[in-house]
Amino acid sequence: MPIERKAWACQHGCGRNVLTSRKRMEAHEARCWRNPARRACASCKHLNEYDDDNGIGGTPYLQVWHVRECLADDGIDLSEKLRHDCRLWENATHDPLPKAAHECICQMAERIKALEASNATHDGRQGVTP
């Protein structure tokens, strides 16, 4: 039977997997690109991201690459490195936790409750988890 562990997830919704150490997650959040306090590109409304390729007019292409550019700074290319503590930064209005991630967390919580109830019933101690 698996062992229950407490895990911590980034509150900024960066997609980072959970960590078992609260201290390590707090350190991650302090430097997270999606943390608005960091004033980084990933949480800025001026970030423009798209995929580009070397195809011309619908012809087959050989390469695809991800482009990141800042719309506030003359379209400067950020594909190599994002910025932080930017003077042009403006908060993007996005959901810090994507809907799919929220639904997944809710489903996991329901499964845990069902398992706890099942364990309590099997142990003959209704409402008490081992």
Image (spheres, rainbow, N blue to C red):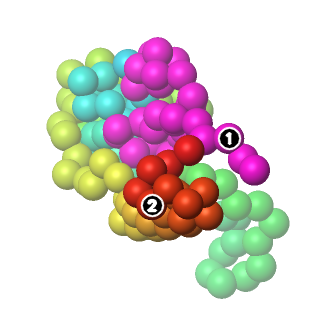
Other-residue count near label 1 (Cα within 10 Å), few / some / many at <14 / 14–19 / ≥20: few
Q: Residue at x 76, y 61 (%)?
A: 63
In the picture, measured across the screen, residue 103 lies left or right of residue 37, that is: right
Residue under label 1:
3
Q: Which residues are magenta?
A: 1-29
Q: Residue at x 45, y 60 (%)?
A: 126
Q: Amino acid at mark 2?
A: Gln
Q: Position of residue 48 (x, y in %)?
A: 38, 52
Q: Position of residue 74 (x, y in %)?
A: 31, 39
Q: Residue at x 36, y 65 (%)?
A: 99
Secondary structure of the residue carrying tag 1 is loop
Residue 122 covered by magenta stretch = no
Residue 6 seen in the figure = yes
Q: Position of residue 46 (x, y in %)?
A: 28, 45
Residue 18 covered by magenta stretch = yes
Q: Amino acid at mark 1?
A: Ile
Q: Residue at x 62, y 81 (%)?
A: 57
Residue under label 2:
126
In the picture, measured across the screen, residue 85 lies left or right of residue 79, that is: left
Which quadrant is the C terminus positioned in? top right
Considering the whole magenta stretch, tell me its main secondary structure.
loop
Of the two numbered discs 2 and 1 in the rendering, the one whose residue sits closer to the viewer: 2
Q: Position of residue 20 (x, y in %)?
A: 57, 29
In the picture, measured across the screen, residue 51 lies left or right of residue 31, that is: right
Residue extending furthest bottom? 58
Q: CA distance from mark 2 to mark 1?
A: 21 Å
> Is 36 placed above or below 47 here?
above
